[in-house]
Structures are given as C-alpha cells and as structure tokens.
Image (spheres, rainbow, N blue to C red):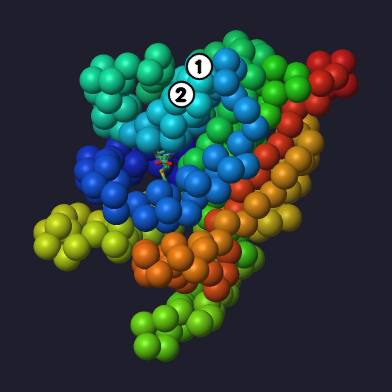
Amino acid sequence: MNHQEVGRYWNENAEVWTRLARAGYDVYRDQLNTPAFFALLPDVSGQRGLDLGCGEGHNTRLLARRGACMTGIDIAEVFIGHAQASETAEPLGIRYLHGSAVSLPFGDAEFDFATGCMSFMDIPETDRLLAEAYRVLKPGGFLQFSITHPCFDTPYRRNLRKDGITYAVEVGDYFHRQDGEISEWIFGAAPASLIAGVPKFKIPRFNRTISQWLNLLVAAGFILERVEEPRPSDEAARQWPYIQDAQVVAYFIHFRVRKPVAADAER
Ligand SMILES: C[S@@+](CC[C@H](N)C(=O)[O-])C[C@H]1O[C@@H](n2cnc3c(N)ncnc32)[C@H](O)[C@@H]1O
C-alpha cells in the first residue's frame, strides 16, 4: 500500500475523528502525548515550522500559539478543511495545505523546524518522508515527532487486567512487518451513546522496529538529540483511567533529531 492509498483511508476517518477529538476523546493525545511533546520542544517563537500530518490542526494551533509561523500539511482533504475552518474562525497565521509528507511542495531549507505528531508511523515510505523532512529544514534545524512505540504497539498485543487495572501487556510479532494491514478502532474514551452506529476508524498499519527507526533517521542524515517515552502521572491516571495502561509500558515514543549545521557541505 502506498501513501496515496493510505490517504484515502484517513480521509474517510477524518470527519468522525475530528468530531470526537474536538469533543475531548483523544485522551492519549490530550493528556499524555501533547503535554510530553511540548515539554520536549525547544523555543520555537519567531521560527518557521512545518507540521507534517497535521490532521485537523490541534497541535499546529498550539505551535502557532507558542509564537511559531506555522504551515500544516495533511494528505486528507477533510482534515485540512476542518483545520482551515478553525483558522478562518480564529486566525493564528497558519497556512494549511493538502498534500503528502512524502513529496513536499516546498523548496530546500525553507523551515527552521518540522514536527510530526503521531503521523509518521502511518506513512509507508518512511525513508522518503525523512528525506523530505531533512531537505526542507535549514541546516541546524530540528525535526521532532511522536509515534506509537514500536516495542509495545506490536501487531499482537493484549492487555492483562485485574479489577479493571492493566498490570501487564503481552506483546508479540514484533518482527512481523505489516504493510497496510487495517486496524479498526475508535476512541475508547467516547461514551457508548456517542459512538453507537458510528463507523470505526480504518487505519493501515506499517510497523518498524526500534532499530529500523533509528537507522532510518541516521541514513537520512539526522543527528539524534533527545528521546522520550511519555508516562502518565498517578494523578493523570486517576483522573483519566483510560490512560492508566500507559503507566505499565510505553505506548508512545518521541524523538528530536537535528540536521547538522554543516549539512550542505557534508552531503
Ligand atoms: C493519528 S493522525 C494525527 C493527526 C494530528 N497530527 C494530531 O496529532 O491530532 C495521523 C495523520 O497523518 C496523516 N497522514 C497520513 N499519511 C500522510 C501523508 N503521507 N502525508 C501527510 N499526512 C499524512 C493523516 O491524514 C492523519 O491526519
């Protein structure tokens, strides 16, 4: 499956995803990943940033509110429509484009930084994606992205629970490479009444092992700068029991990598 076919699935998911995420049911994003992502983010004020796979623009808006001059790109037209509608209603100076992160419509070295919030694991052409991110960054610019954790979001996974509390997670098939196998789910924190009759998301999966991710980053020319594995605090897990299982294993991993300052001379 290629990125364009993947995009058609995401376009089908986008309407319901936007409605439920905006109603607060993307709890892993809002209560775990986004706070961790922004804690890791360097100062971006006054910088030109590109959000790859921006979806309906939630994190792009947060980046703009930190003072960055943002461009968001997504392969799903419906997501871009919702992102643009928010921009029109409450302008933050964000430019949204419908397109693929695998083939970016920008010149070389146009951006000071790039981000990808939970989008890179959904793109099959990882090498082309990273090469494009590298190309559009200025030398010295950084790329920060979050993905589902390759070691714990494996093709086989089962939560082991006692009294409703996850105490372990069984994982397997780590080395089985998925090429667009469809995973069907919906935000589990949403009330049953809200999701009754609503089609589940259909998400093509493309897992990479942790060494494959690291080697792809190195092959693209990036320097590894920071890695984080967000874990909810006890207080967050009490308030949002839905994310308690992310205290047991790391469901997500965040990377910050940098294009070397002398990049043009070296490559
Ligand atoms: C899990 S959603 C995350 C959306 C958003 N970043 C957020 O944090 O809410 C993954 C996003 O990646 C987008 N996507 C998938 N393949 C893409 C590609 N080749 N180029 C750009 N966006 C892509 C999807 O359309 C979707 O919006």
Query: Does 154 sit left or right of 72 as displayed?
Result: right
Q: Position of residue 123 (x, y in %)?
A: 51, 41
Q: Residue furthest front?
A: 235
Could you tell me if residue 137 is visible in this image?
A: yes
The residue type indicated by label 2 comes to Ala
Q: Residues under labels 1 and 2: Cα distance?
A: 6 Å
Dot 1 or dot 2: first in sequence order is 2
Q: Nearer the viewer, residue 104 or 54?
A: 54
Q: Is residue 12 left or right of residue 64?
A: left
Point out the quarter of the image occupied by ligand 1. Answer: top left
Note whether 259 is above or below 227 in the view shown: above
Q: Say few, some or many: other residues with alpha carbon within 10 Å of mark 1 (under 14 / 14 to 19 / 20 or more).
A: many
Q: Could you tell me the amino acid type at mark 1?
A: Cys
Q: Check if mark 1's residue and mark 2's residue have beta carbons within 8 Å.
A: yes
- The quarter in which the C terminus is drawn is top right
Q: Quadrant of residue 110?
A: top right
State left or right for residue 178 relative to residue 221. Answer: left
Q: Which residue is mark 1?
A: 69
128 vs 25, nearest the viewer: 25
Residue at position x 61%, y 36% from top? Answer: 41
Quarter of image, res 60: top left
Q: Secondary structure at mark 2?
A: helix
Which residue matches tag 2? 64
Residue at coordinates 24% horizontally, 47% vertically from top-left? Answer: 23
